[in-house]
Image (spheres, helix red, strand yellow):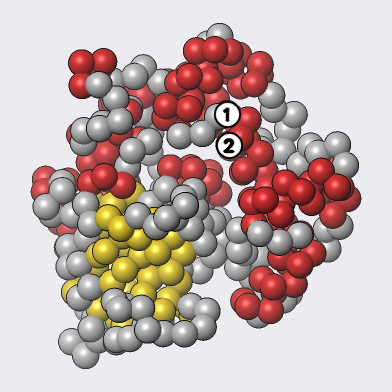
Amino acid sequence: MADKTEAGSNGFRSFRNLDASNVRADVRMDGVYFFRSSISYPFNKRLEPGDFSYCVMVRRGRARLTIDFPEPRVIDLSAGAIVGVSGLAPHRLHSVPDIVPGPPDAFERVPISEQIGPDGDVELLVGVAPSENIALSNLIIGPLYLSRESSPECARRIWKAAELLDEEFIDAGQEYGQAIIVRRIAEIILINMTRSILAGPAPDRAAESGPIKSRGVIMALRAFLDSPLENWNIDRLARTAGMSRTKFTEEFRHIVGRAPMQTVARMRLTLMARKMLMEDLSVEEAADMSGYSSAAAFIRAFSREFGATPLRWRKLQSADDGIEKDRNPHLQSP
């Protein structure tokens, strides 16, 4: 599939089919934190892989996000841009033109309480939500992009929340309730990113059809993400959604962009890839955990998804990332 370069609102085809009645209101961002980063050209970076969902806010400069999952996509980012990225999705943030050879390295993390000088070409504010469910959801949906041009009101509110974060931490010591304030600011950012998606057009369906009532699909998807290795089939998913098989399959495909069981298989393989990278998990154990009838069937499916057999993929990833089993378990690659 050819890469698709985007600089605006057409990056949210799937989620634009929702209306406000379909989205949970009880947003919680427990454990969220922020850091700053400054980068000089040229650069080739990536966010720490694992069970994280990131909100990258560009304060200064230009960068390009290249992401490979759920489909190849390229998004150009300039000052004022905001993008949500799953730590489970293979990605790079790099300079334009892309002239840095080799694998990407990690961002320098500057504490939120410290200011960044004017020396770097690009300045970022990055929010990190350590949540597997949010990361998996972000992985399925794809990167969530908005800017002051595509969603001016939502972008204004998000940047206002960033100003509140600065006021709370710059030149300030430890004060009562800071963790709560950080969580609330993160919730404001997430809510406004969701609003920007809901407010956008849905170019892939007729305007007169109106928004799809997809609460059931969201319920089924959430249930699967809570227990992705259970024995899920189309009947169980449809029952969870409170729909017939046919209706559920139609609406799921319209929202997610893939058939239900194709999505289930894709997510299970992603989970198994991460487990195999960090644990002494054999191919047979991985095949059994992910519901395949044999190791051979698992290897074929894995190879289609990742372009290498499970053992070859694990060897390549471990060599590229320098991952050792006694390191932080969050340092996982999909």
Q: Foreground residue, 163 or 234? A: 234
Q: Quadrant of residue 328?
A: bottom right
Q: Amino acid at mark 2?
A: Thr
The spot of residue 154 in percent (x, y) is 17, 46
Q: Viewed as shown, does residue 320 lie left or right of 128?
A: right
Q: Quadrant of residue 204?
A: top left
SS at badge 1: helix
Mark 1 and mark 2 residues within 8 Å of each other at the beta carbon: yes
Q: Quadrant of residue 239?
A: top right
SS at badge 2: helix
The spot of residue 304 in percent (x, y) is 67, 51
Q: Residue furthest front?
A: 2
Dot 2 corresponds to which residue?
Answer: 263
Q: Amino acid at mark 1?
A: Pro
Asked whether residue 314 is in view, the answer is yes
The spot of residue 190 in percent (x, y) is 32, 46
Dot 1 corresponds to which residue?
Answer: 260
Q: Is residue 192 above or below residue 54?
A: above
Q: Is residue 32 above or below residue 175?
A: above
Dot 2 crowding, Cα within 10 Å, few <14, some 14–19, many 20+: some
Asked whether residue 114 is in view, the answer is no
Q: Is residue 209 above or below residue 179?
A: above
The residue sitting at 30% across, 78% down in the picture is: 97
Q: Viewed as shown, does residue 149 lie left or right of 27?
A: left
Q: CA distance from mark 1 to mark 2?
A: 5 Å
The spot of residue 334 in percent (x, y) is 60, 58
The residue sitting at 62% across, 43% down in the picture is: 266
The residue sitting at 66% across, 16% down in the picture is: 235
The residue sitting at 30% across, 58% down in the picture is: 5
Q: Foreground residue, 222 or 181? A: 222
